Image (spheres, rainbow, N blue to C red):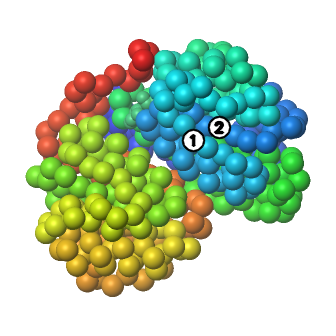
Amino acid sequence: KKGGYPHFMLKEIHEQPDSLRNTILPRIQNKLPDFTADNIPDSLFDGITRIVITACGTAMHAGLIGRAMLEKLLRLPVTVEVASEFRYQDPIIDKNTLVITISQSGETADTLAALKLSRERGASTLSIVNVKGSSIARESDYVLYTHAGPEIAVASTKAYTAQLACLYLLAFRFGFATGKLEKEVCMDEMQQLLSIIPAVEETLAQDKVIEEISKQLTEKEDLFFIGRGLDYALSCEGSIKLKEISYIHSEAYAAGELKHGTLSLVTEGVPVVALATQQKVYSKMISNIREVKARNAFVILITIDGQEAEPSIYDYHISLPEIKDDYAPFLAAVVLQLLAYYTSLHRGLNVDQPRNLAKSVTVE
Ligand code: F6R
């Protein structure tokens, strides 16, 4: 059942080129994104003035990346809400709000409750779900399925990248349908989305390098993930993944925010996973890395091929295939998943079934 892999998690990490292919390819028609087969009409955005994304855990982290893409291409305000908070906040939503819920299992109690509340208040609802016919899928006006296949390991991996792909497809289709994205630009974005598949394959080929680096983390008890923009959203995901299966405490921090308090925790040998995949904030990010290196932090730097980084600011460097800023999260996610996986493995833990956690959280 594990297809020759020692754990489901490793199998599922390596399945990502396939799960991305299965999620993206059926939604392409004449080089444009197309949801005809999903029964999602172009009129979905008629009258919509804002979008609320609500989900839990890793699915919520996918929403953080989705927000950036949707805002950029649709020019509509998007907020991302933790479902367990949103449902008790008396949220301001109405018929002009599109509520997007994201869930692998489709059964997460808080996400389902947030969805029901949104419907009661008249919002349009669309869910991005992996499990066919699940409660969240049934309760939503529209469903965009991630065709990631069954995800068995408690730590979510391939579902997350498939959720990202769905959010990007939504941003492209509705950017195009609402006239905000020109046809050629939309086609070009689709082309770039497709190009992540071989790039994810290339990233997976660094498996052994990441395994080696993870050996440096096995004895640690605290670490930081830092980044800016999409890399900050990814830091949140890297941090939950590591905590969940390696039981090492970590924190995700917006790199520019460190000096407002948390830098006092960065001392000699404290590992800092520094994500610097975003060209537009690259020099700012490098300054932040210099700040932690000046405190003798142990820096694992993640950049895109072609970006210069002076060796004095890092201890280990992982370089990803060249790709535009918006598409880097797919590659960086793979690195963070492998880092968490191998750290857990080297600590001798139960990778697929970490303590205290369940795959599907059907209680609030
Ligand atoms: C982390 C993880 C959880 C889930 C969360 C939501 O690796 O798997 O954070 O993402 O419990 O679950 P779903 O997506 O099933 O609603």
The residue beneath circle 2 is 52
Classify 10 Å Cα crowding around label 2: few (below 14), some (14-19), many (20 and above): many
What's the CA distance linking mark 1 and mark 2? Answer: 6 Å
User: Are discs 1 and 2 less than 8 Å apart at CB?
Assistant: yes
Q: Residue furthest left?
A: 219
Rendered-image quarter of ligand 1: top left
x and y percentages locating residue 120 in the rendered image: 70, 17
Query: Mark 2: which secondary structure?
Result: strand
Q: Which mark is residue 80?
A: 1
Q: Residue at x 45, y 76 (%)?
A: 284
Q: 33 above or below 225?
A: above
Q: Position of residue 199 (x, y in %)?
A: 52, 60
Comes first in the chain, label 1 or label 2? 2
Q: Disc 1 residue type?
A: Val
Rendered view: 199 above or below 237: below
**Tag 1, which secondary structure?**
strand
Taking the image as shown, residue 349 lies to the left or right of residue 93, namely left
